[in-house]
Image (tube, rainbow, N blue to C red):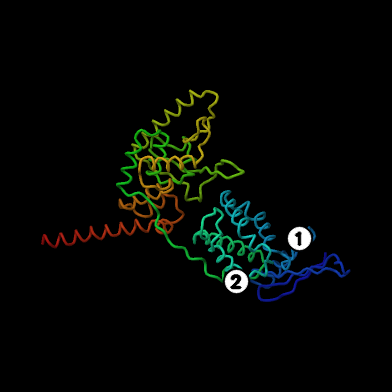
Amino acid sequence: MPGSIEKRGENSYRLIVSGGYGPDGKRKRYTKTIKVEGKTESAKLKEAEKELAKFIAEIEGNTFIEPSKLTFKAFVEKWLEEYAKDNLAPKTLYRYKEMLDKRILPALGHLKLNKIKPIHILEFLNMLKEDGTRLDGKKGGLSSQTIKHHYRLIHAMLEDAVKWQLIPSNPASNIDPPKVNKHEAEYYNEEEVKELVKALDGEKLKYQVAIMLTLAAGERLGELMGLKWEHIDFDNNTIEIVQANQYLPGQGLFTKTPKNETSKRLIAIPQQIMDLLREYKKEQNLERLKKGNKWIDTGFVFTQWNGQPMYYDTISKWFSKFLQRKGLRHITFHQLRHTSATLLINAGENIKAVSKRLGHSNTSTTMNIYAHALKSADKDAADKIANFLFENKNQA
């Protein structure tokens, strides 16, 4: 199959391939404009020749789709198959497919990829604000945060389309991202934490351990459910976060590596909570003996009646009912993580140590989420320095 290369600009070339015949009897001509990198013309041409060979292979293998005929829906299918399934976490991929199937593709899927304009994306985002957009039947449009998630997904996919040289530029880059109203992370203050700990007396040991460990370590719920006894060092009073449990419809419960590399971490745990863990381990061992061959030894700390790993929504639902039963202010189980971080910051712990303990990829994430606690801690610091300065002045 013959092919040729035409220089179009300093770093761009047009690939031309002839092959086969159309319905009119004329020979088909395929073209594709590419951008290449190289310090010399010879190096650039060599890269263009490699791309030409790939282009010819695509045409011969019937995998090439002319950009002018490629719909956004067809591109998304290719993006999911060629990129997303191997590079995204299962839960992220599930959430993206949900956004695509329920809203993005019904609105934009029919458009030709190279004909999508910023106005199309802007109209779609504005539509998400309208009443009736929600799938749960509630009034009003989607939250600003959810709309921003849709924008980010569209932008990311179109950015890949640019990298793959299917379109010259990203139309989503030409509109401003949706503004999100910032909300302070919900958490318990010191007095509420004391009430919570007191209210735990008499509750099942499994739930006491789960709550106390989250308050002490600030781990994510999936990380807590993925914790195994082998990750607990009773001699050195530490737990190691190396995995997380998640659940997806159609896939069930599965174990995966944590959110990012910094999520793998070693966390020091207070002696009192380690003692509580020891007590719970003894209780679980007795339960295992009672169940006999019905017990499946998975090694997880938090299990169902037969040793299988506990579903993480089990503890979330229990916690909600527990708070209602005890007359305590409602927060979600995840907000115990926020409570842990806030307590540390208010106690004077430096932000880098808090960030590392939480498993954040950088301190800026911690600072953005816990701005309320940092502001409060800064005010306390100002009061302390004022007391020091003026107390010394008065003594003088």
As drawn, the label of residue 233 is none
Residue at 49 percent across and 59 percent down: it is 143
Report which quarter residue 73 is drawn in. bottom right
Whether residue 114 is situated above or below residue 356 in the rendered picture: below
> Where does the image place residue 250, in percent across and percent down from the top left?
62, 43
For this orientation, the residue located farthest to the bottom is: 9
Residue at 61 percent across and 43 percent down: it is 251
Q: Quadrant of the N terminus?
A: bottom right
> Where does the image place residue 38, in percent across and percent down from the top left?
64, 69
Viewer-nearest residue: 107 or 248 = 107
> Where does the image place residue 45, in percent across and percent down from the top left?
71, 70
Residue at 60 percent across and 64 percent down: it is 159
Whether residue 283 is situated above or below residue 352 in the rendered picture: above
For this orientation, the residue located farthest to the right is: 25
Could you tell me if the residues under marks 2 and 1 are in contact, i.e. CB atoms within 8 Å? no
Q: Which residue is mark 1?
A: 58
Name the amino acid type tagged 2.
Ile
Instruction: Answer with left or right where residue 65 lies relative to residue 107.
Output: right
For this orientation, the residue located farthest to the left is: 396
What SS does tag 2 mark?
Answer: helix
What SS does tag 1 mark?
Answer: helix
Whether residue 226 is situated above or below residue 385 in the rendered picture: above
Q: Which residue is mark 2?
A: 119
Report how many numbered discs are placed on residues in the image. 2
C-alpha separation, residue under disc 2 versus residue under disc 1: 32 Å
Sequence-wise, the earlier of marks 2 and 1 is 1
Name the amino acid type tagged 1.
Glu
Whether residue 274 is situated above or below residue 367 in the rendered picture: above
